[in-house]
Image (spheres, coloured by chain):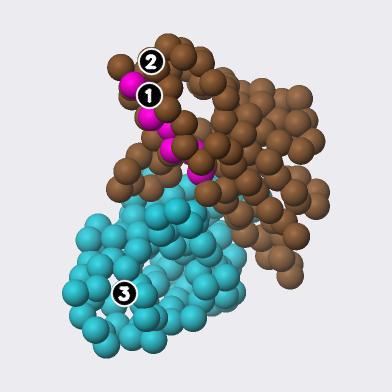
Chain colours: A cyan, B brown
Amino acid sequence: DGGITQSPKYLFRKEGQNVTLSCEQNLNHDAMYWYRQDPGQGLRLIYYSQIVNDFQKGDIAEGYSVSREKKESFPLTVTSAQKNPTAFYLCVSSRFWTEAFFGQGTRLTVV
Amino acid sequence: EDQVTQSPEALRLQEGESSSLNCSYTVSGLRGLFWYRQDPGKGPEFLFTLYSAGEEKEKERLKATLTKKESFLHITAPKPEDSATYLCAVPVSTSGTYKYIFGTGTRLKVLA
């Protein structure tokens, strides 16, 4: 079945630690996105990529990093510079200008 | 500035009580408007795509419509299983690339 797979579903980060969220898609979509969802704030764009080896900062990129070495994969690293990382993270993929499809999300909690 | 606004923020309905959710948008050159359903703790699930004013799409108890300024998601005779957050989104162009702007959603609760 085609789709977007995010892992892990739950992730716990200690203070000062970097963690990486995985996102893989087999829909042959060119564009991939990372959004952060907080209660009452809607979806905020972190980073996005339209082609391999190229990506752009979204509205809240500080404290995050990404890579796009393969079309199918777009991992997100939450660095220690991100002071408030507790949130629900959603990976999205799409074809040019068409409807976006979501992964099932990763819930990150600082412990 | 490109913007998407949804109303109301929350809506409580009795089972069978029909209503509508609103999604107002301000974008230069609409290239589509998308509706999603999100259940707690899960990623949003795609429902509909609308491309031009006057277009309508239906799925079970849901019907989405589009005008030049807004979209409505009509829910006819809702059931408790329709309880979820409904999101709308539009794609916008930025510096030769494109991204999606989402509304903050409408939390729907249908009471039995």
Q: Chain of mark 2?
A: B
In this rendered view, identify the residue nearer to me: B1 or A9. Answer: B1
The CA distance from mark 3 to mark 2 is: 43 Å
Report x, y in % for residue A8: 24, 62
Please name which of the two marks, 3 or 2, marks the residue nearer to the observer: 2
Report x, y in % for residue B17: 46, 14
Quarter of the picture containing the N terminus of chain B is bottom right
Amino acid carrying label 1: it is: Val
The CA distance from mark 2 to mark 1 is: 6 Å
Residue A37 falls within the magenta-colored stretch: no
Secondary structure at badge 3 equals strand
Total labels: the figure holds: 3
Earlier-in-chain disc, 2 versus 1: 2
Quarter of the picture containing the C terminus of chain B is top left
Residue for badge 3:
A20
Mark 2 Cα within 10 Å, few/some/many (few <14, many 20+)? some
Amino acid carrying label 2: it is: Glu
The relative height of residue A81 versus residue B95 in the rendered view (above or below) is below
Residue for badge 1:
B110
Mark 3 Cα within 10 Å, few/some/many (few <14, many 20+)? some
Q: Is residue A24 left or right of residue B94?
A: left
The relative height of residue B16 versus residue B44 in the rendered view (above or below) is above
Report x, y in % for residue B87: 52, 42
Secondary structure at badge 2 equals loop
Amino acid carrying label 3: it is: Thr
Magenta stretch, residue numbers = B105-111
What residue do we see at 31% from left, 74% from top?
Answer: A20
What residue do we see at 59% from left, 42% from top?
Answer: B6
Residue for badge 2:
B15
Q: Is residue A85 left or right of residue A101?
A: left
